[in-house]
Image: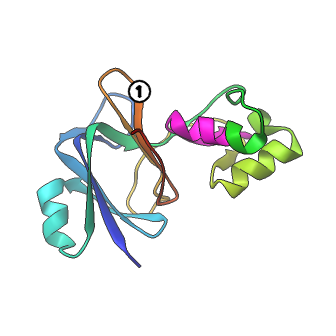
Amino acid sequence: MALTIHVADELRLAWDGTGAVPGGAVAVEGDRVAATGAAAELQERFPGARVRRWPGALGPGLVHEGPLPEAPTPRERVHELLKLGAVAVPAESVAGAGLRAAAERGGVRVLPEARPATITAGGRADLAVFAGDGSCVATVCAGRLVHRRR
């Protein structure tokens, strides 16, 4: 499996304000987090890995609460969600069969209820990068880059 290291100005293992790592990174193998830490350390540990550099703060993909953004089709509604840095939703947010199917096809996790997101080694590689103004720069869902701001 190909390995990718996502590097950002700052790594957050959770968005609760604790544990920021300046110049931190997440190594992703397939759909899982292989490791987290300082970028230089991960690049040394995984020398053949592809490296993606992002401006801003890298952390866990968000759990979107409430209705999904409006768009013409369920697939487009899910894509709008990914553009916000969200990779999971509580089940009540995708009550319709078409919307739930679109979420599952897009790799978005449907959870029994909302919960805080974290990055853990061995966990699913759901990541988001946010610029200083709070806008989403990139979203990684189950190890796949599904949104990148141009």
Given residues 63 and 148, the one toward you in this image is: 148
**133 to 52, vertically: above or below:** above
Q: Quadrant of residue 4?
A: bottom left
**23 to 2, vertically: above or below:** above
Tell me the element at label 1: loop
Q: Residue at x 39, y 39 (%)?
A: 150
Q: Quadrant of the N terminus?
A: bottom left
83 magenta-colored = yes
Q: Residue at x 77, y 33 (%)?
A: 72
Q: How many marks?
A: 1
Given residues 31 and 84, the one toward you in this image is: 84
Q: Residue placed farthest to the bottom in the image?
A: 1
Q: Residue placed farthest to the top in the image?
A: 133
Q: Residue placed farthest to the front in the image?
A: 150
Q: Residue at x 38, y 23 (%)?
A: 134
Q: Which residue is mark 1?
A: 135
- Residue type of the residue flagged with mark 1: Ser
Left of 68 or right of it: where is 126? Answer: left
**105 to 16, vertically: above or below:** below
What segment carries the magenta color?
Answer: 78-91
Report the coloring of the rendering. rainbow
Left of 4 or right of it: where is 85? Answer: right
x and y percentages locating residue 13 in the rendered image: 34, 43
x and y percentages locating residue 62 in the rendered image: 51, 37
Left of 84 or right of it: where is 25? Answer: left
Mark 1 packing: few (<14 Cα in 10 Å), some, or many (20+)? some
Given residues 45 and 1, the one toward you in this image is: 1
x and y percentages locating residue 113 in the rendered image: 69, 38
Left of 62 or right of it: where is 77? Answer: right
x and y percentages locating residue 84 in the rendered image: 52, 33
Q: Quadrant of residue 54?
A: top left
